[in-house]
Image (spheres, rainbow, N blue to C red):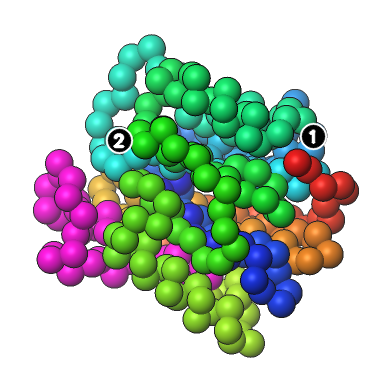
Amino acid sequence: MCLITFRYGQHKRYKLILAANRDESYNRPTVGADYWPEYPSLLAGKDLEANGTWFGITKQGKVAAITNCHGEEFTEPEKNKQSRGQILIDYLSKNQDPVKFIKQLIATKDDYQPFNVLLGSVDILYHYNSKDNHYTKLDAGTHSLSNATLNTPWPKVNNTRQQLDIIIQTDHDYIQDLFTMMMDQTPAPDSELPEAPLPLEIRRKASANFIKTEHFGTKSTTLLLVDWHNNVTYIERNYLSEGNHEDRIFNFQITKKSN
């Protein structure tokens, strides 16, 4: 997942509104979002290559998402590194305080390729960047995370933060508007492209909210809306060949607050 934009608190109806794109090699095997048999309270997609996930929520309201750091998705992974997706499973499958979990993660961060992790609950969220080796409790408001760090002023980060603030001021269907935002393939102007060791044409395509190249791109979009009564709407849109897509929709009420 390479773009996560969300409104945390400060909304009359929802305590959390989140939209996230997973950008990955098209041939990487994946199972769409569902409840996991081995962890029945966990709702998430599964990466079948490493058996981890990129985003998940539990019936108790724990939330976690991860992105790699800038440029890592276009390079061969180092050998003997653990899957970053396992970080989310370790957090979401256990009853552990998020700050304690992050402090333990800091001690083992070099076991993984560089990453950003967003974790906590629908009420309290934290961000940790393994390159900066810094974590913070997030303030209420609108945030966005791609492959640098939280709220880095890349075009897609700035644009989706601004667009989300506009969307939530309307009476339109948030879900359709959020999908439209996340499926936008408009590239940034060349003068605003983030620096990266990539060909110019790839940098252009990767600057869009929705990435589409020959072998790599946006494989799915996940929307999460949680209201102040802890009612959850979770929609995962998986992109199929020839411009088709399949939506997986889940609704539930959080059973108890997590830490």
**Residue under the image location 37 percent in, 37 percent down:** 132
Upstream in the sequence, badge 1 or badge 2?
A: 1
Residue occupying the far right of the picture: 255
Residue 91: x, y in percent? 65, 31
Q: Circle 2 — which element?
A: helix
Q: In the image, what residue type sits under mark 1?
A: Pro
**Residue under the image location 18 percent in, 64 percent down:** 192
- 218 to 95, vertically: above or below: below
Disc 1 marks which residue? 40
Report if residue 186 lies within the magenta region.
yes
Residue 252: x, y in percent? 81, 55
Q: In the image, what residue type sits under mark 2?
A: Glu
Judge whether residue 249 can be spotted in this image: no
Mark number displayed over residue 106: none
The label nearer to you, 1 versus 2, is 2
Disc 2 marks which residue? 72
Instruction: Name the side, left or right, on which 216 lies relative to 56.
Output: left
Q: Nearer the viewer, residue 83 or 221?
A: 83
Instruction: Name the side, left or right, on which 62 lies relative to 117.
Output: right
Residue 73: x, y in percent? 32, 37
Badge 1 density bin: few <14, some 14–19, many ≥20, Cα 10 Å? few
- In the image, which residues are magenta? 178-207
> Is label 1 in contact with label 2 (beta carbons under 8 Å)?
no
Question: What is the distance, in whole Å, between disc 1 and disc 2 at their CAs?
Answer: 32 Å
**Residue under the image location 13 percent in, 65 percent down:** 190
Q: Nearer the viewer, residue 143 or 181?
A: 143
- 244 to 125, vertically: above or below: below
Residue 54: x, y in percent? 53, 40
